[in-house]
Image (spheres, helix red, strand yellow):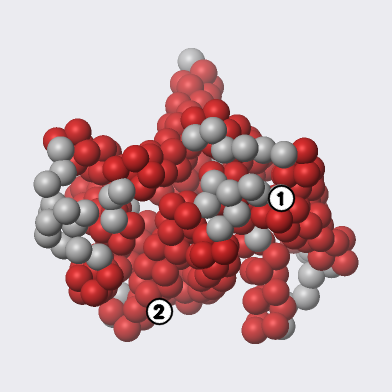
Amino acid sequence: MGWAGAQGRLAAGLLVNLAASICIVFLNKWLYVRLGFPNLSLTLVHFAVTWLGLYLCQALGAFAPKSLRPRQVLPLALSFCGFVVFTNLSLQSNTVGTYQLAKAMTTPVIVLIQSLAYGKTFPLRIKLTLLPITLGVFLNSYYDVKFSLLGMVFAALGVLVTSLYQVWVGAKQHELQVNSMQLLYYQAPMSSAMLFCIIPFFEPVFGEGGVFGPWTISAVIMVLLSGIIAFMVNLSIYWIIGNTSPVTYNMFGHFKFCITLLGGCLLFKDPLSVNQGFGILCTLLGILAYTHFKLSEQEGSKSKLVQRP
C-alpha cells in the first residue's frame, strides 16, 4: 500500500505539473489575443499570487524562510522580472510553436555564458547537440508564415535574460545555501515592487486596456486563475525535482514540449509547414541528445564518487 500510495502521489504531481504548464501557455495567449490584457500587468499578478502562495506554504510549514539581505537578491529579482516579461511578450507576439521553440535556445546560450564568463568546459558531444537545436529553431522561425520581427526580438531577449537568470540562480543557491522556494520567497515581492513602479510608464493603469479598467467578471477570474496556475507550475516543479530522478523530470519536460506545440496548432490555428515540422524535429532530437549526454555525465560523476576510497 505504501508503494502504491507513493506512486499515486507521484502520478498526481506529474499530472498537476503537466496540466498547469500547458494551461498557463494557452491561458496567457488567450488573455493577450482575445482580451488584450496588458502584459506587464499580468506578470505583476503572477508575481503577487506567487508570493502570496509561498507565504501560505511557509505558514503551513512547507519550507522555512531564510533571512537574506535585499542586495543579495536584487540582481536575481531584476533578471526574474526581465525573463518573465520578455517570455510573455514573446508569447504575445509569436505563434505558440515559435514561442516554445525559441525557449529551447536557452540551453545553447547557457553553455555559451558558462564557457565565456565562468570558464566552464563542455565535452565535444555536448557542444554538437547544440547544432540541431539551433538549426531547428532557425528553420521554424524562417518558415513561420506569421513571422514577427518584434516577436523574435522579444524571444531573443527572453532567451538571453532567462539564461542569465538560470546561471545566477544556481550560483546564488550555492552561495547563500538556500533552495529554490526560499530564494523565490524573496524574489517575488521585490520583482512585484519593481513592476508596480514601472507599469505606469508603459501601460495604462485606469480606463480602457488598463489593469484597473472596465474588465468583465469573467476576465478578472481568468486573470486570477492565470496567477494561481503560474504558482502551481512553480510549486509542482519544485516537488517533482525533489521526488523524482533527473531522467523523469527531463523526459516529462520533452512530453510537455510536444503537447504544447500540438495544442498551439489545434487551439489557435497556428499554421505548420513541412519545413517548420523538420525544424521542430531537429530541435527535439537535439534536446533529447543533450539530455542523454548530460544525464550520462552526471551518472558517471556519481559512480566515481562512490568508488573513491
- Residue extending farthest to the front is 145
Tally of numbered tags = 2
The residue depicted at 64 percent of the width and 47 percent of the height is 145
The spot of residue 246 in percent (x, y) is 63, 46
Residue 260 - label = none
Q: Is residue 300 left or right of residue 62?
A: right
Residue placed under numbered mark 1 in the picture: 143
Q: Nearer the viewer, residue 159 or 237?
A: 159
Which quadrant would the C terminus be assigned to in this image? bottom right
Mark 1 or 2: the one toward you: 1
Label 1 crowd bin: few (<14), some (14–19), many (20+), radius 10 Å: some
Task: Residue 297: name its quadrant.
Answer: bottom right
Q: Is residue 195 visible?
A: yes
Residue 64 lies, in percent from the top left, at 29, 57
* Residue 10 picture location, percent across and down: 50, 30
Which of the marked residues, 1 or 2, is nearer the chain's N terminus?
Answer: 2
- Under circle 2, the secondary element is helix
Left or right of 93, for residue 135: right
Cα distance in 3D space between marks 1 and 2: 37 Å
Query: Measuring 78% from the left and 44% from the top, which residue is drawn there?
Result: 275
Say whether marks 1 and 2 touch (CB < 8 Å).
no
**Amino acid, disc 1:** Tyr
Per the image, the residue denoted by label 2 is 75
Q: Is residue 288 left or right of residue 76?
A: right
Label 2 crowd (10 A; few <14 / some 14-19 / many >=20): some
Q: Secondary structure at mark 1?
A: loop
Q: Say which residue appears at 45% left-offset and 64% top-offset.
A: 86
Where is 291 relative to 232, above or below? below
Residue placed most toward the observer, 115 or 95: 95
Q: Position of residue 307 (x, y in %)?
A: 80, 57
